[in-house]
Image: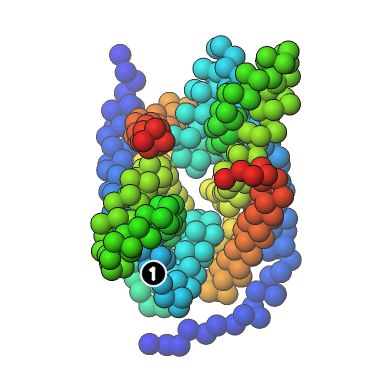
Amino acid sequence: MTAVDFEPGFVFSHLGPLGQGLARTLAISAVGTAGALAVGGLLGAASALRIPVVRQVIGAYVEVFRNTPLLVQIFFLYFALPEAGVKLSAFTVGWLSLVLWGGAYNAENFRAGFEAVDPKYVEACRALGFSELASFRRVVLPLGTRTALPSVTNTLISVFKNSSFMIAIGYPELTDTAVDIVSVTFRAFEVFIAIGVVYLGLVWIFSLGAGLIERRFAIPGGH
Amino acid sequence: MMPLWVGPVARYMATGLVTTLALAVVSIAVSVVLGTLLGALLVLPSRAVRLAVRCYVEIWRGLPIIVTLFFIFFVLPVIGLRFDTFVAAAIGLCLWGSANVAEVVRGAVQSVPRGQADAAAALGFPWRQRMRYVVFPQAVRRAVPPLVGLVVNLTQQTSLATVIGVLDLLQASQRSIERLTLSSGATHAVPILGAVLVVYFVICLPLTSLSRRLERSLQRA
């Protein structure tokens, strides 16, 4: 068996394209994360407030996006929508698919958090003359958000990891760039270990950050 | 009357679906068995064992599955191992799946109140019997709802095998769209990819609601 020649220095000669790939990964992840947070928070609140019809529509959206693979959703947006007259760029599909997917998971995370707030609190608010919306905004929202926080940050970290799915539509993010380099140079070890370290490093930093935020906002005296 | 292209495309996609299901069954079975073992190791008193398993779990859970799949796909031939794409995809999914199952199992065991094991210890049960008769049966009930959720997740993740060239449901649909484009100029991507979404939805929805029902009955108990 021939010895596998391993040259860690090789990666440094491709830092330029890999850096650009990472920048694109971070760009679609940032938009995806912000969007998933906004969509999830709004839809979660609307479901928890039990607004008729709206609640059922949101429920359908959540079920469809949670019960089909993200990759198929990406394919549908990129390959099928043009047939219906909607042509989106790879970048748009990149962030949009992450927003739709992460938004569905977060809508469920937030809804569960809001509904976990003891109804006695809301009853107390109503007895004190708060309107339904005011009691939601002043009591359910702050408490429920903190309960939902761990699952929400989990989903957001998945949004970051899943930005790698965009390789399937040729969007030159980090993974796509790496595979391109490997298919020309066959330096699989060096390149994949390098991007593996980058992904793992970022995931761990994000998890640490999420842990800090969770502890900072933990409900005092809560379980 | 169905258009003529539907029959052949549906048959081709059915063979893809068989591959998808086979990949899902293999990955789920191996992940659950291997993950349960690793999860059990994570609650052992030995520090060195815990550290080793923790590394495995953090690496394969933290990496995007696509990166793992490409790594296996490109690296195995380099070190002289020949694999077909199905095996490469199965290995990648099992690494990710087993790491996640291990974490679920550890979480379930550690969520059993300490007082339970303490009480068993006070009654004179040695460690193995405490685990077997007191902690384990309660942990299993807590582990089942997230495990069903993980089964749904793994089933969906099998679609990633497409990117390394496995002829699964998604790949079959993609090739059908390309062929129809070449032969007739019309892509029919909306009905074909729409059908793929429907198939996954029909498989996953019952499992998702089962997981939710189990979760709820656990909370009531």
B190 horizontally vs A33: left or right: left
- For disc 1, the marked residue is B44
Quarter of the image containing the C terminus of chain B? top left
At which x and y percent is residue A130?
A: 73, 16
Q: Is residue A209 above or below residue B198?
A: below
Report the chain holding disc 1. Answer: B
The residue drawn where x is 31% and y is 40% is B17
Q: Is residue B60 above or below residue B18?
A: below
Q: Classify residue A50 by image quadrant.
A: top right
Instruction: Tell me the element at label 1.
Output: loop
Along the line of sight, the residue nearer the viewer: A60 or A84: A60
The N terminus of chain B, quarter of image: top left
Q: Residue at x 48, y 73 (%)?
A: B51
Q: Residue at x 38, y 78 (%)?
A: B80
Q: Quick one: A34 or A97, which is closer to the camera?
A: A34
Colouring: rainbow
Dot 1, crowdedness within 10 Å: few (<14), some or many (≥20)? few
Q: Position of residue A35 (x, y in %)?
A: 68, 36
Q: Nearer the viewer, residue B76 or B190?
A: B76
Q: Residue at x 53, y 74 (%)?
A: A189
- The image quarter in which residue B91 lies: bottom left
Taking B156 as reference, is A21 above or below it? below
What residue type is disc 1 on?
A: Leu
Q: Position of residue A184 (x, y in %)?
A: 57, 68
